[in-house]
Image (cartoon, rainbow, N blue to C red):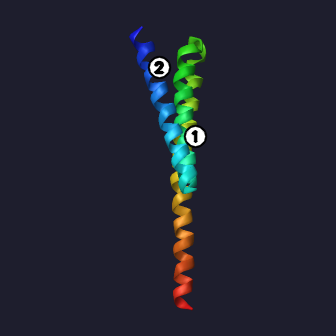
Amino acid sequence: MTDSFLGGAIVIAAWAISLFFFRFGKSTRDRLFGFFGLAFLLLGLERVCREFVPGILQPYVYLIRLAAFLLILFAIWDKNQKQKKTGAEAEKEKRR
């Protein structure tokens, strides 16, 4: 019973964090926050699935967590690619 209660608290926290990231991403128009919001939404979904999916399918639930972490890595990579492009463009402007 305690595990279910703590799991529910983690789900609510993850979804609240995702809403924060979505709102912040909307106000700044930065894709990084949208990706983070989606990742936390997936992490909350993974916790819900762990509670309701039968035991034999439990290992597949962790693929949702893997997708969330890969999404976070992609978001960081995407943000760094944008900064490299804008830095390279600024360098070209300086040379002109």
Q: CA distance from mark 1 to mark 2?
A: 18 Å
Which residue is disc 2 drawn over?
8
Instruction: Give me the residue at 59% from left, 24% from top.
Output: 60
Q: Can residue 88 be seen in the rendering of this structure?
A: yes
Q: Tell me: residue 10, above or below residue 83.
A: above
Residue 9 location (% of width, % of height): 43, 22
Q: Nearer the viewer, residue 35 or 73?
A: 35
Sequence-wise first label, 1 or 2: 2
* Crowdedness near tag 2: few (<14), some (14–19) or many (≥20) residues, C-alpha within 10 Å: some
The single residue placed furthest to the bottom in the displayed view is 96
Tell me if I can see residue 74 in this picture.
Answer: no
**Where the C terminus falls, by quadrant?**
bottom right
Residue drawn at (53%, 90%) of the image: 95
In the displayed orientation, state which residue is furthest to the front: 27
Percent x, y of residue 75:
54, 51
Query: Which amino acid type corresponds to the residue marked 1 in the rendered image?
Result: Leu
State the mark number for residue 58. none
The residue identified by callout 1 is 38
Q: Secondary structure at mark 1?
A: helix
Q: Position of residue 43 (x, y in %)?
A: 52, 32
In this orientation, which residue lies closer to the viewer: 12 or 42?
12
43 above or below 82? above
SS under mark 2: helix
Residue contact at pointers 1 and 2, CB within 8 angstroms: no
- Quadrant in which the N terminus is drawn: top left
The 10 Å Cα crowd at callout 1, few under 14, some 14 to 19, many 20 or more, is some
Q: How many marks?
A: 2
Identity, as a three-letter code, of the amino acid under mark 2: Gly
